[in-house]
């Protein structure tokens, strides 16, 4: 919970990846608070008060997953909203002549995004969601200690660089420091 709060405040891209991991952890535990308590919460060395906060947080997320019909796949609305907010900012940054380096990073990543969308058959999916799915997939491959091809590494570097720049602009925008227009 505190990790999520920190990431949301400091790096929205890392926050979203983290929250997708949490969704998968909840799925692995059948969105059952007893299993979540036993397999996840019990591993934290925290006070009783913090344990209750963690339990409430995980329980609320599991309840939301059941209610929103994303118990087996998909993402919570709170996480989809992050993608929507980032997509709005992405469009504004591309439309502004003040951010040529951002546009350059996007157009460098675009061929990889198109290729990924063609491979996964989700051509209607938002581009940013494709990017985050690719990064999340890469994370899972690394956790499983699977080999990653040089082509995939090159694609992920371009996508990661692009998303990192977007996350930085998102942070500036939230702080009121981003001026899209003159």
Image (cartoon, rainbow, N blue to C red):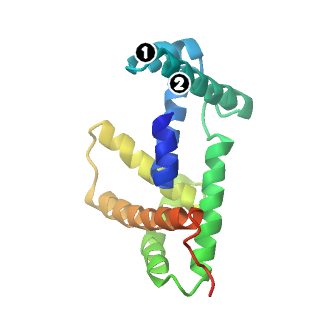
Q: Would residue 63 appear left or right of 107 to someone viewing this image?
A: right
Q: Which mark is residue 148?
A: none
| Rendered image quadrant of residue 23 | top right
x, y percent for residue 18: 47, 42
- Is residue 136 depicted above or below 153 in this figure? above
The residue carrying mark 1 is: 42
Q: Is residue 180 visible?
A: yes
Looking at the image, the residue that sits furthest to the right is 67
Q: Identify the secondary structure beneath mark 1.
A: helix
**Depth check, front residue: 173 or 160:** 173
**Depth check, front residue: 170 or 127:** 170
Q: Is residue 119 visible?
A: no
Dot 2 crowding, Cα within 10 Å, few <14, some 14–19, many 20+: some
x, y percent for residue 37: 50, 15
Labels 1 and 2: the sequence-earlier one: 1
Residue at image point 51% right, 81% down: 99
Residue at image point 61% right, 68% down: 89
The residue carrying mark 2 is: 54
In the rendered picture of this protein, how many numbered marks are placed on residues? 2
Q: Identify the secondary structure beneath mark 2.
A: helix
**Depth check, front residue: 179 or 59:** 179
């Amino acid at each position: 919970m505190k990790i999520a709060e920190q990431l949301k405040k400091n790096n929205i891209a890392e926050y979203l990846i983290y929250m997708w991991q949490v969704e998968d952890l909840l799925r692995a535990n059948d969105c059952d608070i007893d299993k979540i308590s036993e397999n996840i919460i019990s591993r934290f060395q925290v006070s009783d008060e913090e344990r209750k906060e963690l339990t409430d947080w995980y329980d609320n997320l599991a309840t939301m997953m059941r209610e929103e019909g994303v118990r087996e796949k998909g993402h919570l609305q709170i996480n989809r909203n992050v993608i929507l907010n980032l997509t709005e900012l992405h469009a504004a940054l591309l439309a502004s002549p003040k951010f040529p380096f951002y546009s350059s990073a996007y157009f460098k990543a675009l061929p990889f995004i198109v290729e990924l969308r063609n491979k996964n058959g989700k051509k209607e999916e938002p581009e940013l969601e494709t990017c985050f799915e690719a990064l999340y997939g890469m994370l899972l491959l690394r956790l499983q200690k699977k080999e990653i091809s040089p082509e995939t590494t090159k694609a992920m570097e371009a996508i990661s660089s692009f998303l990192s720049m977007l996350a930085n602009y998102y942070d500036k925008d939230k702080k009121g420091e981003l001026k899209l227009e003159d």
